[in-house]
Amino acid sequence: MTTPETPRDRRNRLARESYARRRSLLMAEQLEHRRAQQREAYRLRTEAESSQQTEHRRKNRRAAYVRHTQQRCASNAARIQIYDTTTVERHHLGSMDVECSHCCAMHWIEKKVSGSVFTTVFSTCCANGKVQLPTINQPPEPLLSLLTGEDSRSRNF
């Protein structure tokens, strides 16, 4: 439950909001003024240049645009190559059929602790037997039949 806003809190909140609005308007005005100055400077600069200078400027802008487009296409091609499934071989860990000797959790054989030659010890499930979780009880009958049944209701559950 929230406490009601006091008149003082309301006055302070409204003052902060008003200040933020004025500041954003001022920043927008300043930005627009700067853009207008830049447009005017560009207009004056382009009016004063010769036809050779104009051609040179346009040629440079076209070249920059082409370079930018080529770089963008190259980076897209690199991204596509990363996710190209035809060149990447699929990794398969095999079946998850090895039981932890401490907690009976199922694992892949490749995930066992290195050095555990004679027993299958894993550290990701129970930290090598340091964590003891209580056994899970059987679910109540309606749920158990849905989990283990072979009928259409069980398959869609």
Image (tube, grey):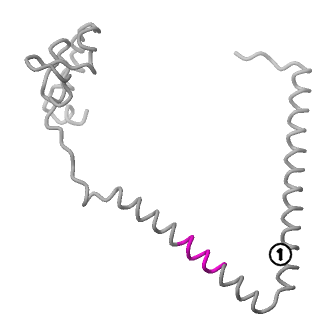
Q: Which SS class for mark 1?
A: helix
Instruction: Check the image and report above or below for 53 versus 22.
Output: below
Compare residues 20 and 151 and report the one nearer the observer: 20
Q: Residue at x 7, y 17 (%)?
A: 118
Where does the image place residue 111, in percent across and percent down from the top left?
21, 28
Asked if the stretch drawn in magenta spans residue 66, the answer is: yes
Where does the image place residue 46, in percent across and percent down from the top left?
82, 82
Badge 1 is on which residue?
Answer: 42
Taken as a whole, is the magenta stretch helix, strand or loop? helix
Instruction: Check the image and report above or below for 153 versus 68.
Output: above
Q: Residue at x 83, y 75 (%)?
A: 42
Compare residues 26 and 141 and report the one nearer the observer: 26
Where does the image place residue 124, in percent across and percent down from the top left?
28, 21
Residue at the far bottom: name it: 51
Q: Residue at x 91, y 21 (%)?
A: 7
Q: Which image quarter holds the C terminus?
A: top left
Where does the image place residue 120, in percent across and percent down from the top left?
13, 19
Instruction: Check the image and report above or below for 136 versus 147.
Output: above
Residue at the far left: name it: 118
What span is colored magenta in the figure? 61-69
Amino acid type at circle 1 is Tyr
Report the side of 65 relative to 34 (left or right): left
